[in-house]
Image: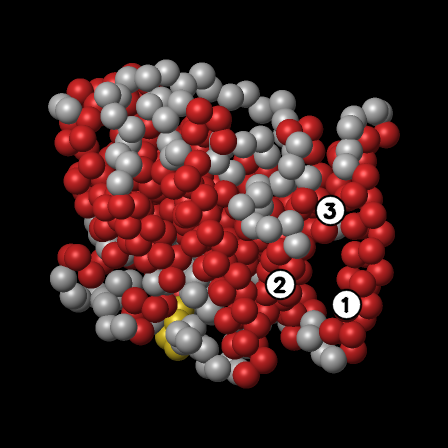
Amino acid sequence: MTAGAANEQAPEAHDGAHEPKRVVTSVSPQPFPPAGWLADIGLGLTVFLLMTLSPLALIELGFSYGEAGGTPIEKIHPGTVLAALVLMATLPTQGNPLRWLEAEAARTPVLVFYALAIALLMAHTVLVVKLPFTPLIDTFIGPLIIFLLYRQMPEQRGRKLAYLLHAIMLANALIGIGEYATGLRITPLVAAGVVIDDDWRSTALLGHPLSNASLTGAYILILSLGSGRDLPPSARPLALILCAAAMVVFGGRAATVLLLGILAMLAVQRLARVVTGARFNPQSILAALIAIPIAAIALAGLAEAGFFDQFIERFIDDKGSSEARTELIELFRHISWHDLMLGPDARQIETLLSLYGIDFGIESFWVAYTLTNGIIVSQFFFVGLMLFCREIQLAVRPGGGWVLVFFFLVASTSVSLSAKSPLLAVLTLMMLILMRDPKIDEEPHAR
């Protein structure tokens, strides 16, 4: 990855430029959300809450967010609550809200299918599995609300939100590095109600180290795909370097390896296109020739100072994390085909997890939902989720598919979306704001 990669702004500089784009037609009488300082504050505050109040922070503040007890409102992230309030408050600006919803459903029927998939999953969770449905609100309904609110933004609003998002991500990286250097944390690391004191990984603003690694990696990928245009050109390589260092202190091995692999593929793809005659910016070559030796010297200095020691140690001794993932296959041996199709008894799964020493959850999003809800309901929901992600991809600039592939590959190696978390909502925010299509500003009334 070079500094020039973040500076290329021409459309041909973006990998994945052949992704299809949807033609947007007008069905709403007014822009949604409407212009004005009140809507700007609501949208900005939603970004701030979702990206600075992690589940760990809510628990530290005394909310019964992921624990038993407490009021129902404590089980929902404040950012999700505010997003829902902004949506409800701005719907009347469209005239008849029901007609607006009907028009949205006709324009994007995939969203209806996704909402039905969530409703089926909720009903199955409550009626069959006998588990609470509140984790699904933040994890999957929140992203849908975010999509409706942020997918169509005039450039002026989008630029303001982008400045805020960049500031939060860079602050998160700086805080993470500071926590690593000092050994202190803003919020303690908690897993399954247990405070983990012997883990060196930083929690920063985004919470769990793996959540940090997933979202920071997605941010690096977004910048590398050319979607850092709101940052000054001189700040883009600095943002990339800072976040790359933060990936080390968050300790996400899978996220780091996958990120490097995708960046390498994009670099090879870009080089092949240049060799075959595609246009390129000569300044990017000069920037690369300057940045590569500087980066090599910096990496050598950090390695000599021991900056990477603990991160490398996790590849050697991961405290049983890899073993817990491999033992997931063994769980299926104890479940009948009937239960596997419709959903095993939750107490049986808890017993098996305890028997195999899997204390901190099933470290694979896909496996966790299959074992909890059964193959039939889970596969139906996965189809809805993938179609929803396809809508996100179509709503942003070329390259969004790579970001989603990275995110879900990382989700395949961790608890991620199988736990209550605004993780997907934050990713949706990042993509819709940073990778927004500037053409939208030419048709401010387009829906």
Q: As rendered, which of 298 and 127 lies closer to the eye?
A: 298
Left or right of 132 on screen, residue 235: right
- In front of the other: label 2 or label 3? 3
Please state, as top left, top right, bottom left or bottom right, where the C terminus lies in the image. top left
Element under label 1? helix
Q: Marks 3 and 1, Cα distance to the nearest angstrom?
A: 19 Å
Residue at point 73% right, 46% down? 4
Instruction: Give the residue type that dot 3 points to.
Output: Gly
Q: Amino acid at mark 1?
A: Leu
Residue, disc 2: 242
**Residue 232 visible in the shown view:** yes
Give the residue number, with chain letter if any, for mark 3: 4
Give the vertical position of 404 relative to 355 (above or below): above
Residue 347 on image: x %, y %:
29, 57
Query: Mark 3 packing: few (<14 Cα in 10 Å), some, or many (20+)?
Result: many
Name the mark on residue 299: 1
Residue 230 x, y percent position in the rendering: 53, 46
Give left or right: position of 73 versus 116: left
Residue pictured at 42% horizontal, 47% vertical: 160
Q: Quadrant of residue 429?
A: top left
Q: Nearer the viewer, residue 400 or 351?
A: 400
**Label 1 CA crowd tier, 10 Å (few <14, some 14–19, many 20+):** some
Q: Is residue 411 positioned above or below 277 on the image?
A: below
